Image (cartoon, grey):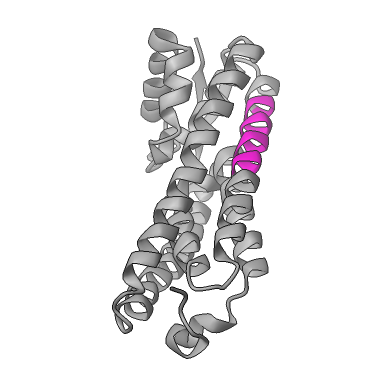
Amino acid sequence: MTLAASDLGPFETVGPVVVWILVLTFVFLECAFIIGLFLPGDSMLLTAGMVLAGHSAGVMHVWTLSAGAAAAAIAGNQVGYVIGHRSGHHLAARRDGRYFNTANLHKVNALLDRHGFWSVLIARWIPWVRTLCPLVAGAARMNHRRYTVASSLGALAWAPVLLLLGFYAGEFLERVPWLMPAVLGVMVTALVVGTILGVRQYRQELAKPTEDYEVE
């Protein structure tokens, strides 16, 4: 069963191309740069899957987008690693920062030191660790091949799972005509508000003074 355009309401104008652009952008930024600490990446993937459930070619799009999102995450991981590697053993944290602070960097550093490969793999499912892990791994000079294998496996499990979860949840919600637009409305609203607040908090974080953290 596929939703009719009239059932989708305002979401009928959200084409797959827009979903692709948003998902690939969010996933890459969250895995590559500090701004990813403040972006609702998990919510974006779930919402994108639900939106695609309402399109006639949704199955094709969600599976191909799953591959694309995994590739974007893998690429983002590599960019984050290179940034950390080029910073040497020193990362500039933010004094009194909410996420990008010395305490969180130390937690990620200790996690990598104790568990290495497995910590990179599991970090994919912890939002703020997901962004900091590539930077710390690069600064700590973690073996690049081991890092690439672990981060790639994590990316292959993370993005496709959330997209497909949202998609098949959306198909289930289609059984109740009014429920799908209502749930999508709430999720899209939360996503937009979360992104706006996240960007605002990111700017506030960058405005705070820096403090040096030495990666072991």
Residue 51, x across and y down, in percent = 49, 69
Magenta-highlighted stretch: main secondary structure? helix
Residue 156, x across and y down, in percent = 54, 35
Residue 93, x across and y down, in percent = 49, 32
Q: In this view, does 156 lie above or below 55?
A: above
Residue at 39 percent across and 66 percent down: it is 171
Q: Is residue 114 above or below residue 193?
A: above
* Side of 209 where 82 appears, left or right: right
Residue at 50 percent across and 52 percent down: it is 202
Q: In this view, does 79 lie above or below 21?
A: above
Front one among 97 and 189:
189
Q: Which quarter of the figure has residue 12?
A: bottom right
**Quadrant of the image containing the N terminus:** bottom left
Label total for image: 0
Residue at 47 percent across and 39 percent down: it is 158
Front one among 165 and 85:
165
- Do we see residue 105 in this rendering? no
Q: Does the magenta stretch include residue 205?
A: no
Q: Which quarter of the figure has residue 137?
A: top right
Residue 40, x across and y down, in percent = 44, 54
- Do we see residue 148 in this rendering? yes
Q: What stretch is highlighted in magenta?
A: 70-83
